[in-house]
């Protein structure tokens, strides 16, 4: 019997008892919580939570944009339009927790946290959880919350999940920013609720946050020999035709450029692996609808390197407030000897650093292994589960440890497979 099958059978036995265990037991912590300066008081009544989906999310565009100006961690993947677009995926049930605070001029949106109801990513445990991000091509699960209302908003959101009959009580966060004030607040809130999280994995991803201009930054990021090589590639590519670097930002031209991107991506290794957006009609529809919606507000654009009008490399960029996200990239493999991806990275690094709207850029990379590791800054990321119920539960302790064991075994099998291929 395979290890995966054994784990699956064990998880099924635990899952049968998952919701029958009493919820008034403290969960033994899977990691030590860092000391916090204070324990927050119970959530003030001034923050109320609305569970929303579908058409309701389309009604809060102005409130969302206002929240972004106050958010501690702007996250484009919590955009109400993107959450509503999960309808592109049949059978998907997404929910958004909207946090409102009473103000003299009326309710003010102070937080948005969206989840999909279903099995957790990379899990064989047959239970439903609240998982974030809400769709496969999203790369950050951090809620967008007013920086002045972090603790009380998180308290209210988690209480809502714990008390809402139709929602699972286990929250699975696949890509939570670990080094920000929102994560620190979540640690404090969970500690005060006696519901310790289970930390499943830590990693880091490249980010761009610098006061340097593009030329200065690349001089610092790359060695002299690497920069010389890129200059040679650019010169040799320009000898083959007219080489142009463009930023495409008008909604109509963005839509046309996106079609070029989709064709470029599916023609490469992602197409051969079946992971390109065009390989799944729902993914392609989602991408078109999302980029169009964001571009109409200046929050999506495409950087492209063209040779005689033919795209050599393309990068889709999304924005939420002062944070940009390098969402998807593709390049022409017929030109790979000229490193079109790195040439384009050089171009859009300079453009993003020069953009006064942008304070930092999230690479959306899974780790440090991609070419975007040229960016010198790093963002700490965490994959974790926690129980919304105060005091946690014995069931959660068992289930989370089973998931941790499964992920460790999975990593060992992958490492052994890669080692075998290298022999």
Image (spheres, rainbow, N blue to C red):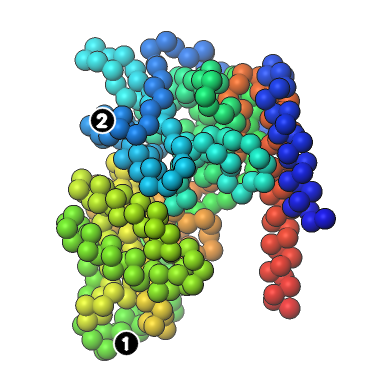
Residue drawn at x 57%, y 50% as measured from the top left? 203
Regarding residue 179, the answer to whether it shows in the image is no
* Quadrant in which the N terminus is drawn: bottom right
Residue 362: mark in rendering: none
From the viewer's perspective, is 247 left or right of 31?
left
Indicate the position of residue 151 as horizontal and vertical percent values: 47, 22
Q: Is residue 368 above or below residue 362?
A: below
Say which element carries label 2.
loop
Badge 1: residue crowd in 10 Å (few <14, some 14–19, many ≥20): few
Q: Between residues 44 and 171, which one lies in front from this camera angle?
A: 171
Name the mark nearer the viewer: 1 or 2.
Answer: 2
Q: On screen, 289 above or below 162?
A: below
Determine whether the residue tagged by mark 1 lies in a helix, strand or loop.
helix
Residue 234 x, y percent position in the rendering: 31, 81
In this view of the protein, which residue sits in the foreground, 420 or 50?
Answer: 50
Q: Residue at x 67, y 46 (%)?
A: 124
Farthest residue to the front: give it: 90
Q: Residue at x 20, y 57 (%)?
A: 249
> Label 1, label 2: how many angstroms apart (C-alpha)?
51 Å
Image location of residue 341, percent across then percent down: 38, 71
Of 151 and 392, which appears nearest the observer? 392
To which residue does mark 1 refer? 236
Location of residue 146 with respect to 308 vertically, above or below: above
- 417 or 19, which is in the foreground? 19
Looking at marks 1 and 2 on the same chain, the residue that comes earlier in the sequence is marked by: 2
Kindly check if marks 1 and 2 are in contact, taking CB atoms under 8 A apart as contact. Answer: no
Residue under label 2: 59
Report the residue at 60% width, 21% height from top: 389
Q: Quadrant of residue 16?
A: top right
Is residue 245 among what the camera can see? Answer: yes
Q: Residue furthest right?
A: 1
**Where does residue 67 sit, x and y in percent of width and height?**
30, 31
């Amino acid at each position: 019997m395979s290890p995966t099958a054994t784990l699956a059978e064990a998880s099924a036995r635990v899952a049968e008892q998952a919701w029958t265990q009493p919820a008034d037991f403290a969960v033994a912590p899977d990691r030590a919580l860092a000391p916090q300066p204070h324990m927050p008081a119970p959530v003030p009544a001034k923050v109320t939570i609305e569970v929303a989906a579908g058409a309701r999310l389309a009604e809060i565009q102005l409130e969302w944009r206002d929240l972004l100006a106050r958010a501690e961690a702007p996250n484009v993947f919590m955009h109400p339009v993107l959450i509503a677009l999960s309808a592109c995926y049949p059978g998907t049930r997404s929910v958004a927790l909207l946090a409102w605070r009473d103000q003299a001029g009326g309710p003010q949106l102070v937080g948005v946290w969206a989840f999909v109801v279903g099995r957790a990513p990379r899990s064989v445990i047959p239970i439903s959880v609240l998982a974030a991000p809400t769709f496969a091509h999203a790369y950050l699960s951090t809620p967008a919350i007013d920086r002045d209302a972090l603790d009380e908003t998180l308290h209210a959101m988690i209480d809502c999940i714990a008390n809402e009959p139709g929602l699972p009580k286990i929250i699975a966060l696949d890509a939570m920013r670990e080094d920000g004030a929102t994560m620190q607040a979540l640690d404090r809130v969970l500690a005060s609720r006696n519901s310790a999280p289970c930390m499943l994995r830590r990693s880091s991803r490249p980010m761009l946050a610098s006061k340097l201009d593009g030329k200065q930054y690349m001089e610092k990021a790359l060695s002299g020999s690497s920069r010389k090589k890129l200059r040679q590639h650019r010169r040799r590519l320009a000898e083959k035709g007219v080489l142009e670097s463009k930023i495409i930002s008008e909604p109509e031209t963005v839509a046309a450029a996106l079609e070029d991107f989709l064709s470029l991506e599916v023609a490469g290794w992602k197409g051969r692996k079946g992971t390109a957006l065009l390989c799944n009609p729902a993914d392609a529809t989602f991408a078109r609808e999302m980029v169009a919606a964001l571009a109409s507000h200046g929050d999506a654009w495409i950087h492209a390197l063209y040779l005689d009008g033919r795209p050599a490399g393309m990068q889709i960029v999304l924005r939420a407030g002062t944070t940009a996200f390098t969402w998807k990239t593709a390049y022409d493999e017929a030109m790979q000897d000229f490193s079109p991806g790195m040439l384009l990275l050089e171009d859009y690094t300079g453009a993003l650093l020069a953009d006064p709207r942008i304070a930092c850029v999230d690479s959306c990379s899974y780790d440090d292994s991609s070419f975007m590791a040229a960016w010198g800054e790093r963002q700490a990321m965490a994959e974790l589960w926690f129980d919304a119920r105060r005091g946690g539960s014995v069931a959660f302790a068992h289930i989370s440890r089973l998931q941790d064991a499964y992920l460790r075994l999975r990593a060992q099998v992958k490492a052994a497979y890669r080692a075998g291929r290298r022999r």
